[in-house]
Amino acid sequence: MTTEPDLEPTVSLDLPAYQRPAGVHPPLDSPAYRSSQFRAPIQPLVPLPHWLTEVTGPLLGPERVTAGDADLTTRHAGEPLGERIIVTGRVLDSDGKPVPDSLIEIWQANSAGRYAHGVDDHPAPLDPNFDGAGRCVTDRDGRYRFTTIKPGAYPWRNHLNAWRPAHIHFSLFGRAFTQRLITQMYFPGDPLFAQDPIFNSVPDPKARERMIARFDLDVTEPDWAIGYTWDIVLRGREATMFETGAEAGAETGAEADHR
Protein backbone atom coordinates (compact mmCIF):
# COMPACT_ATOMS: atom_id res chain seq x y z
CA MET A 1 0.00 0.00 0.00
CA THR A 2 1.34 3.39 -0.95
CA THR A 3 0.39 6.80 0.26
CA GLU A 4 0.39 10.01 -1.68
CA PRO A 5 3.11 12.44 -0.60
CA ASP A 6 1.95 15.52 1.20
CA LEU A 7 1.98 18.55 -1.04
CA GLU A 8 2.86 21.92 0.36
CA PRO A 9 -0.02 24.37 0.08
CA THR A 10 0.32 26.94 -2.64
CA VAL A 11 0.88 30.35 -1.13
CA SER A 12 0.43 33.57 -3.04
CA LEU A 13 3.17 36.16 -3.02
CA ASP A 14 2.33 39.62 -1.78
CA LEU A 15 4.10 42.72 -3.02
CA PRO A 16 4.34 45.86 -0.91
CA ALA A 17 1.35 48.09 -1.64
CA TYR A 18 1.13 51.85 -1.67
CA GLN A 19 -2.16 53.72 -1.34
CA ARG A 20 -2.01 56.75 -3.56
CA PRO A 21 -3.81 59.88 -2.37
CA ALA A 22 -7.33 60.56 -3.60
CA GLY A 23 -8.17 63.66 -5.62
CA VAL A 24 -4.75 63.95 -7.24
CA HIS A 25 -4.39 61.23 -9.88
CA PRO A 26 -6.93 61.00 -12.74
CA PRO A 27 -10.05 59.00 -11.86
CA LEU A 28 -10.91 55.87 -13.81
CA ASP A 29 -14.17 57.43 -14.97
CA SER A 30 -13.64 60.95 -16.34
CA PRO A 31 -16.91 62.03 -18.06
CA ALA A 32 -15.20 64.49 -20.42
CA TYR A 33 -12.91 61.66 -21.59
CA ARG A 34 -15.71 59.75 -23.29
CA SER A 35 -14.24 56.28 -23.70
CA SER A 36 -13.37 56.08 -19.99
CA GLN A 37 -17.09 55.72 -19.32
CA PHE A 38 -17.05 52.43 -21.22
CA ARG A 39 -13.83 51.09 -19.70
CA ALA A 40 -14.07 52.21 -16.09
CA PRO A 41 -15.21 49.44 -13.70
CA ILE A 42 -18.69 49.79 -12.23
CA GLN A 43 -18.26 46.99 -9.68
CA PRO A 44 -15.73 46.86 -6.81
CA LEU A 45 -12.33 45.64 -7.93
CA VAL A 46 -11.40 42.06 -7.02
CA PRO A 47 -7.82 41.65 -5.75
CA LEU A 48 -6.00 38.81 -7.46
CA PRO A 49 -3.16 36.89 -5.79
CA HIS A 50 0.33 37.38 -7.14
CA TRP A 51 1.97 34.12 -8.15
CA LEU A 52 5.58 33.56 -9.13
CA THR A 53 4.98 34.50 -12.78
CA GLU A 54 3.57 37.88 -11.75
CA VAL A 55 6.32 38.91 -9.34
CA THR A 56 9.46 37.70 -11.11
CA GLY A 57 11.20 39.92 -13.59
CA PRO A 58 11.62 41.89 -15.63
CA LEU A 59 14.89 40.09 -16.31
CA LEU A 60 16.92 42.57 -18.30
CA GLY A 61 20.49 42.77 -19.42
CA PRO A 62 22.70 44.47 -21.99
CA GLU A 63 21.78 41.86 -24.57
CA ARG A 64 18.06 42.68 -24.23
CA VAL A 65 18.06 46.46 -23.89
CA THR A 66 20.80 48.16 -25.88
CA ALA A 67 21.86 51.79 -26.24
CA GLY A 68 20.34 51.85 -29.71
CA ASP A 69 16.88 51.17 -28.28
CA ALA A 70 16.82 54.68 -26.81
CA ASP A 71 17.56 56.46 -30.11
CA LEU A 72 14.41 56.50 -32.22
CA THR A 73 16.13 58.41 -35.04
CA THR A 74 18.75 55.87 -36.17
CA ARG A 75 16.90 52.59 -36.61
CA HIS A 76 15.97 52.82 -40.26
CA ALA A 77 17.61 53.38 -43.61
CA GLY A 78 16.95 57.12 -43.61
CA GLU A 79 16.42 59.92 -41.11
CA PRO A 80 12.92 60.58 -39.77
CA LEU A 81 11.17 63.83 -40.59
CA GLY A 82 10.54 66.45 -37.94
CA GLU A 83 12.21 68.27 -35.09
CA ARG A 84 14.89 66.15 -33.44
CA ILE A 85 14.72 66.33 -29.63
CA ILE A 86 16.42 64.86 -26.58
CA VAL A 87 14.26 63.92 -23.59
CA THR A 88 16.08 63.11 -20.38
CA GLY A 89 15.51 63.11 -16.65
CA ARG A 90 15.64 61.01 -13.51
CA VAL A 91 13.32 58.51 -11.89
CA LEU A 92 13.09 59.37 -8.18
CA ASP A 93 11.36 58.00 -5.10
CA SER A 94 9.46 60.06 -2.52
CA ASP A 95 12.72 60.96 -0.74
CA GLY A 96 14.33 62.25 -3.92
CA LYS A 97 16.60 59.21 -4.18
CA PRO A 98 17.32 57.79 -7.65
CA VAL A 99 15.66 54.58 -8.80
CA PRO A 100 18.21 52.62 -10.86
CA ASP A 101 17.59 49.65 -13.19
CA SER A 102 14.02 50.65 -14.01
CA LEU A 103 12.82 49.72 -17.49
CA ILE A 104 11.26 52.72 -19.28
CA GLU A 105 9.38 52.29 -22.52
CA ILE A 106 7.99 55.13 -24.62
CA TRP A 107 5.65 55.33 -27.59
CA GLN A 108 4.47 58.34 -29.55
CA ALA A 109 3.06 59.73 -32.78
CA ASN A 110 5.36 60.94 -35.53
CA SER A 111 5.93 64.59 -36.40
CA ALA A 112 2.70 64.63 -38.42
CA GLY A 113 0.67 63.34 -35.48
CA ARG A 114 0.21 59.73 -36.62
CA TYR A 115 1.06 56.49 -34.84
CA ALA A 116 2.71 53.62 -36.68
CA HIS A 117 -0.25 51.43 -35.72
CA GLY A 118 -2.85 49.68 -37.80
CA VAL A 119 -5.84 51.26 -36.05
CA ASP A 120 -4.63 54.82 -36.57
CA ASP A 121 -6.55 56.13 -39.58
CA HIS A 122 -5.64 59.79 -39.13
CA PRO A 123 -5.05 61.06 -42.72
CA ALA A 124 -1.52 62.24 -41.95
CA PRO A 125 1.57 60.73 -43.58
CA LEU A 126 3.38 57.79 -42.06
CA ASP A 127 7.13 58.11 -41.80
CA PRO A 128 8.92 54.95 -43.00
CA ASN A 129 11.95 55.98 -40.96
CA PHE A 130 10.13 56.37 -37.65
CA ASP A 131 8.30 53.69 -35.65
CA GLY A 132 7.69 55.78 -32.52
CA ALA A 133 8.77 53.26 -29.86
CA GLY A 134 11.85 53.12 -27.65
CA ARG A 135 13.14 51.84 -24.33
CA CYS A 136 16.02 52.16 -21.91
CA VAL A 137 17.04 51.20 -18.37
CA THR A 138 17.79 53.89 -15.81
CA ASP A 139 21.42 54.13 -14.72
CA ARG A 140 22.80 54.16 -11.19
CA ASP A 141 21.65 57.78 -10.80
CA GLY A 142 18.14 56.95 -11.98
CA ARG A 143 18.70 58.79 -15.25
CA TYR A 144 17.14 57.98 -18.61
CA ARG A 145 17.73 59.58 -22.02
CA PHE A 146 15.92 59.31 -25.34
CA THR A 147 16.66 60.85 -28.73
CA THR A 148 13.50 61.12 -30.79
CA ILE A 149 11.31 63.38 -32.94
CA LYS A 150 8.89 65.87 -31.40
CA PRO A 151 5.41 64.38 -31.92
CA GLY A 152 2.68 66.32 -33.65
CA ALA A 153 -0.81 67.03 -32.37
CA TYR A 154 -3.59 64.90 -33.81
CA PRO A 155 -7.38 64.85 -33.96
CA TRP A 156 -9.51 62.37 -32.03
CA ARG A 157 -13.27 62.02 -31.95
CA ASN A 158 -13.84 62.59 -28.26
CA HIS A 159 -15.73 65.85 -28.87
CA LEU A 160 -16.20 68.46 -31.57
CA ASN A 161 -12.88 69.58 -33.08
CA ALA A 162 -10.90 67.61 -30.49
CA TRP A 163 -7.10 67.57 -30.76
CA ARG A 164 -4.57 65.95 -28.45
CA PRO A 165 -1.60 68.08 -27.39
CA ALA A 166 1.82 66.80 -28.40
CA HIS A 167 2.81 64.11 -25.89
CA ILE A 168 4.94 61.04 -25.30
CA HIS A 169 3.62 57.98 -23.46
CA PHE A 170 5.87 56.60 -20.71
CA SER A 171 5.68 53.14 -19.14
CA LEU A 172 7.85 52.30 -16.12
CA PHE A 173 8.43 48.82 -14.76
CA GLY A 174 9.58 48.15 -11.22
CA ARG A 175 11.03 44.97 -9.79
CA ALA A 176 8.18 42.88 -11.21
CA PHE A 177 5.86 42.96 -14.20
CA THR A 178 2.94 43.76 -11.90
CA GLN A 179 4.75 46.93 -10.82
CA ARG A 180 4.00 49.09 -13.83
CA LEU A 181 3.12 52.78 -14.04
CA ILE A 182 1.95 54.62 -17.16
CA THR A 183 1.85 58.36 -17.73
CA GLN A 184 2.19 60.99 -20.45
CA MET A 185 4.75 63.75 -20.86
CA TYR A 186 3.74 67.03 -22.48
CA PHE A 187 5.64 69.99 -23.93
CA PRO A 188 5.66 73.53 -22.53
CA GLY A 189 3.37 76.21 -23.91
CA ASP A 190 1.02 73.92 -25.83
CA PRO A 191 -2.19 75.82 -26.76
CA LEU A 192 -4.22 72.61 -26.70
CA PHE A 193 -3.94 72.00 -22.94
CA ALA A 194 -7.12 73.88 -22.07
CA GLN A 195 -9.41 71.73 -24.20
CA ASP A 196 -7.80 68.31 -23.65
CA PRO A 197 -9.88 66.12 -21.30
CA ILE A 198 -7.08 63.60 -20.72
CA PHE A 199 -4.64 66.26 -19.51
CA ASN A 200 -7.40 67.90 -17.47
CA SER A 201 -8.59 64.63 -15.93
CA VAL A 202 -5.87 65.27 -13.35
CA PRO A 203 -7.85 67.37 -10.85
CA ASP A 204 -4.91 69.19 -9.24
CA PRO A 205 -3.57 72.08 -11.40
CA LYS A 206 -0.12 71.85 -9.80
CA ALA A 207 -0.04 68.13 -10.52
CA ARG A 208 -0.86 68.82 -14.16
CA GLU A 209 2.15 71.11 -14.34
CA ARG A 210 4.35 68.22 -13.24
CA MET A 211 3.45 66.36 -16.44
CA ILE A 212 5.02 69.11 -18.58
CA ALA A 213 8.69 68.86 -19.51
CA ARG A 214 10.87 71.96 -19.46
CA PHE A 215 13.15 73.22 -22.18
CA ASP A 216 16.78 72.73 -21.12
CA LEU A 217 19.54 74.57 -22.96
CA ASP A 218 22.18 72.49 -21.16
CA VAL A 219 20.68 69.32 -22.64
CA THR A 220 20.27 70.90 -26.08
CA GLU A 221 23.04 69.88 -28.48
CA PRO A 222 24.20 72.66 -30.85
CA ASP A 223 23.20 72.14 -34.48
CA TRP A 224 21.62 68.81 -33.58
CA ALA A 225 18.69 68.56 -31.15
CA ILE A 226 16.63 70.63 -28.70
CA GLY A 227 16.72 69.27 -25.14
CA TYR A 228 13.93 68.74 -22.61
CA THR A 229 14.22 67.61 -19.00
CA TRP A 230 11.44 65.72 -17.22
CA ASP A 231 11.88 63.97 -13.88
CA ILE A 232 9.50 61.18 -12.90
CA VAL A 233 8.69 61.01 -9.18
CA LEU A 234 7.04 57.73 -8.20
CA ARG A 235 5.22 58.83 -5.05
CA GLY A 236 4.94 61.51 -2.40
CA ARG A 237 3.92 65.17 -2.56
CA GLU A 238 5.79 65.78 -5.82
CA ALA A 239 4.68 62.56 -7.51
CA THR A 240 4.13 62.42 -11.24
CA MET A 241 0.54 61.67 -12.24
CA PHE A 242 -0.11 58.11 -13.37
CA GLU A 243 -3.06 56.35 -14.91
CA THR A 244 -4.64 53.71 -12.71
CA GLY A 245 -6.18 50.29 -13.09
CA ALA A 246 -8.11 49.73 -16.31
CA GLU A 247 -6.91 53.01 -17.78
CA ALA A 248 -3.27 51.98 -17.77
CA GLY A 249 -2.13 50.64 -21.10
CA ALA A 250 -5.42 51.32 -22.85
CA GLU A 251 -5.22 55.01 -23.60
CA THR A 252 -3.71 54.76 -27.05
CA GLY A 253 -6.39 52.38 -28.23
CA ALA A 254 -9.03 54.59 -26.70
CA GLU A 255 -7.74 57.58 -28.59
CA ALA A 256 -7.82 55.58 -31.79
CA ASP A 257 -11.45 54.61 -31.08
CA HIS A 258 -12.40 58.27 -31.45
CA ARG A 259 -10.47 59.02 -34.64
Image: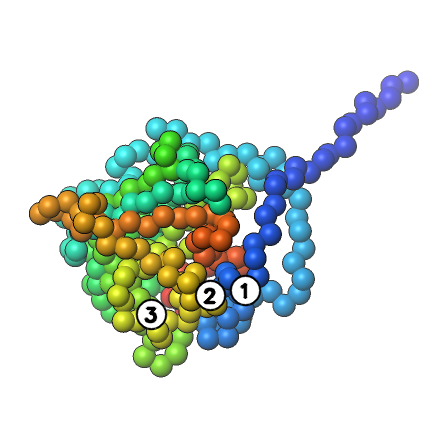
Q: Residue at x 66, y 51 (%)?
A: 47
Residue furthest out toward the left: 223
**Mark number for residue 193?**
3
Q: Residues within 10 Å of mark 1 (few under 14, many from 20)?
A: few
**Left or right: 3, with 211 as reference point:** right
Q: Residue at x 22, y 66 (%)?
A: 124
Residue 166's place in the image compared with 181, above or below, is below
**Left or right: 86, with 197 as reference point:** left
Query: Which residue position holds label 1?
Result: 23
Quadrant, the N terminus: top right
Q: Where is residue 182 in the image (x, y as percent from the top left)?
A: 44, 52
**Dot 2 lies on which element?**
loop
Contact, mark 2 vs mark 1 (Cβ under 8 Å) = yes
Q: Cα distance, mark 3 to mark 1? A: 20 Å
- In this rendering, which labeled residue sits more in front, label 3 or label 1? 1
Q: Position of residue 27 (x, y in %)?
A: 53, 65
Contact, mark 3 vs mark 1 (Cβ under 8 Å) = no
Q: Which of marks 2 and 3 is nearer the N terminus?
A: 3
Residue 101 in view of the camera: yes
Q: Where is residue 198 in the image (x, y as percent from the top left)?
A: 42, 67
Q: Which of 14 and 88 is in front in this view?
A: 88
Q: Earlier in the sequence, mark 3 or mark 1?
A: 1
Task: Report the amino acid beneath label 1.
Answer: Gly
Contact, mark 2 vs mark 3 (Cβ under 8 Å) = no
Q: Cα distance, mark 2 to mark 3? A: 14 Å
Q: Nearer the viewer, residue 234 or 11?
A: 234
Q: How crowded is mark 3: few (under 14 residues within 10 Å), some or many (20 or more)?
A: some
**Mark number for residue 204?**
2
Q: Which residue is drawn at 27% across and 61% down?
A: 188
